[in-house]
Every structure is written in C-alpha cells, then in structure tokens.
Image (cartoon, rainbow, N blue to C red):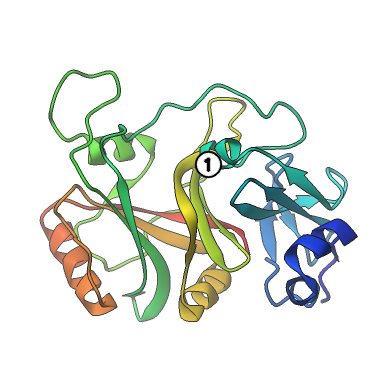
Amino acid sequence: MPRMLDVSDEVRAEIGDEEADRLLAGETAPGSYDCTSCRTPGDCEQERTSTVLFIGDETAVLAFAHAGCLPSQVVKVTEEQLQGAVKSISGDTAGPEPEKVVPEQAVLGVTSGLILIAGELHPALVVEPTAPVVRPGSSGTSDEFLPLLIEQGFMPVTELSSVPPVLHGWSVLLAVGQLHAVLQPGAVEGRPVAWWQAHQPLQVTDGWRTAANKHQQVLMFAAPVGSIGRQPREDLLRDALDKAAAGGRLVAAALPLAGT
C-alpha cells in the first residue's frame, strides 16, 4: 500500500530532492511512528502523515506527525533545545530539565552493532559510561548506573538467549539514516526528552538500519564502566556482552524506533 506521506516544499528544500523522493517512495519512511505532536502511534500506510524537520545550528532531526496534528513544516530551534530534548512543537517547548541519570563527569559511550539472538539478527546499542555513575543528589561514591536504569524499567540480563521486553515511553531516534538520540519520557506530560544525544549524528551500517526498520525497535544494552570496552568487531562485542551478562553486570530493553 502506498505511504500517505506529506513532504512540504520547505522540508524538501532542506533535505534535498533525493531524500524527499526516497521518503515518498517508502524507502526510508517508517511504517509506524509516534506522532511528534500528540505522541500517540501513527501509521503512514494507513493515515496521512506529515514530515516535520527540526533544525538547530548544527543538527537536523526529521520526525513524523499525524497530518491532523501538524502540517509538514520546518521548525527552527536552538541547538541547545535539540541537544536537550526532541519535544512536541504543539505547545510549550521550554519545560523544566529532566532529572539526569548520568552526572556531568561521566560520559556515555554508545556502540552500535548487530546481535544474533535466537537465530535472528537484531540492531543493538551498547551503552557504557566512562566513569562510575552516582545517584543524582547523592554524596555517595557507589556506582548506581544499573540500579538507576532498572528503576526506569530496564531488565537485568543473565544470558542473551531471548529478546528483552519492550520499554514503552523510551525510543531510539533515527533520522535520515543516522542515529540522533535515545529518548525517555520527560517530566512534562511525558513528552520525550533526550536521555542520550549524539553531539553529531552517528552513522550506522546499512545492515543495522535494515534490521531496525524490519523490527521497528532497537535493543539497548547497558553495563557499568569497564564492563564492555570499545570492541572493534561485532563478534568481540558479543563476547563482551555475554561476559557482562554472566557476571550480573548487564541490563537491557527493546526500545521502539522513532524516525526513519
């Protein structure tokens, strides 16, 4: 069934004719999505859908909305707003900052790769901070990275034998084939905010993107500092994940895909 997608002239001018035509042809448009305005599910194969392009000083994020919620348009925001959150443009764009899981001295390292589970390849993100993560507001020094994520709904993993359950409200933002952010529910009416935001959009492989579009979700694995390391190959990444899981140092969730 042809996709019922609206790409306005101003959006086309920003993303280029080639990408606009790929969207309209269904090559990069999602089947289902969360509306960037009302945050309820939509399906561009079943209902008219608008492309909405958020543009900051250095970054652009392509999102989708029900045509009844928003027309296809370009929305210019500050880079700080894009870095801080990908928010609804239907109302308030300046809410309070969400509580940060990771203090400023710890930086999140994010690695993408394909993980084989039960005979099928799944797109995955592996997150490991560069330093221990203490609980916000705490004067303690113990690493609370995994407990904080478990409180958010991530599940402890002891072996990678099955796909982890979906964590609703969280999502992975992929726009124009690049990885932009991991989103979590915000403090203002549950509007999504960035839990992790790429300083520059990260390239992913064609195989990773194909798997993400197939499953319409991304598996996110998280481990404390020193558990995984920077692995140059996917087989070595899998070995590190298996060791972290066996040692009780891994949590995971399946996050719905937002964007293309």
Q: Residue at x 24, y 74 (%)?
A: 232
Q: Is residue 251 left or right of residue 22?
A: left
Find residue 109 and report its horizontal and vertical position in percent: 31, 53
> Which quadrant does the N terminus fall into?
bottom right
Q: Residue at x 84, y 45 (%)?
A: 70
Find residue 76 and report its horizontal and vertical position in percent: 73, 43
Find residue 45 and report its horizontal and vertical position in percent: 79, 67
* Residue positioned most to the front: 57
Say what secondary structure mark 1 lies in.
Answer: helix
Tell me, yes or no, if residue 48 can be seen here.
no
The image quarter containing residue 122 is bottom left
Tell me, yes or no, if residue 134 can be seen here.
yes
- For this rendering, which residue is in front, 229 or 50? 229
- For this rendering, which residue is in front, 221 or 203? 203
Q: The residue under label 1 is which amino acid type?
A: Gln
Q: Is residue 25 left or right of residue 121?
A: right
Find residue 183 and report its horizontal and vertical position in percent: 51, 45
